[in-house]
Amino acid sequence: MSAKNDSATIRAASTGLRREVDRLDVKMKEGVGKLKHEWVYFFVYWSLEFSLIVFLQRIQMELDSRKNEVKADFKQQDIRIEVRRLAVLSRKVF
């Protein structure tokens, strides 16, 4: 009878170990799936953030360019006004 009891004990222990291994396998797969999701989220977020930064830099460059164009236009206008003012003054002198 001792052999039957030992066999039953070993079978019960083996079954318990199999359940534990199956439970750990499920838990590990869930953990790996969660990590994959987190990495995908990280890369998508990083890509979007990088794209937004590049987009904002381009907008800033366009604004700076336009600002410089407007400054140049105002400078040209100031020069034309000064030339006209000097022309008017030179006529009054002569």
Image: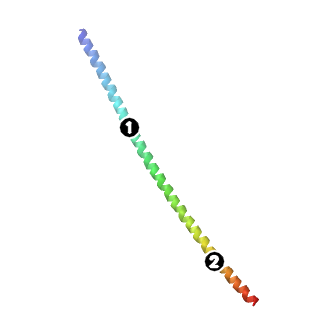
| Vertical order, 6 against 76 (above or below) | above
Q: In this rendered view, identify the residue nearer to me: 53 or 30.
A: 53
Residue 27 appears in which quarter of the rendering? Answer: top left
Q: Is 1 left or right of 17, judged from the image as shown?
A: left
The residue type indicated by label 2 comes to Gln
* Residue shown at 33% from the left, 27% from the top: 21
Residue 72 appears in which quarter of the rendering? Answer: bottom right
For disc 2, the marked residue is 77
Disc 2: CA contacts within 10 A as few (<14), some (14-19) or many (>=20) = few
Disc 1: CA contacts within 10 A as few (<14), some (14-19) or many (>=20) = few
> Please, which residue is most extreme toward the bottom here?
94
**Inter-mark Cα distance, 1 to 2:** 67 Å
For disc 1, the marked residue is 32
| Vertical order, 30 against 70 (above or below) | above
Q: Tag on residue 21? A: none
- Percent position of residue 10, x then y: 28, 17
Q: Name which of mark 1 and mark 2 comes first in the sequence.
A: 1
Q: How many marks?
A: 2
Q: Which corner quadrant holds the C terminus?
A: bottom right
- Percent position of residue 31, x then y: 39, 36
Q: Secondary structure at mark 1?
A: helix
- Percent position of residue 77, x then y: 63, 77
Which of labels 1 and 2 is toward the front?
2
* Residue shown at 32% from the left, 22% from the top: 16
Q: Indicate the colouring scheme.
A: rainbow
* Residue shown at 57% from the left, 65% from the top: 64
Residue 17 appears in which quarter of the rendering? Answer: top left
> Please, which residue is most extreme toward the right here?
93
Q: Which corner quadrant holds the N terminus?
A: top left
Q: Secondary structure at mark 2?
A: helix
The residue type indicated by label 1 comes to Val
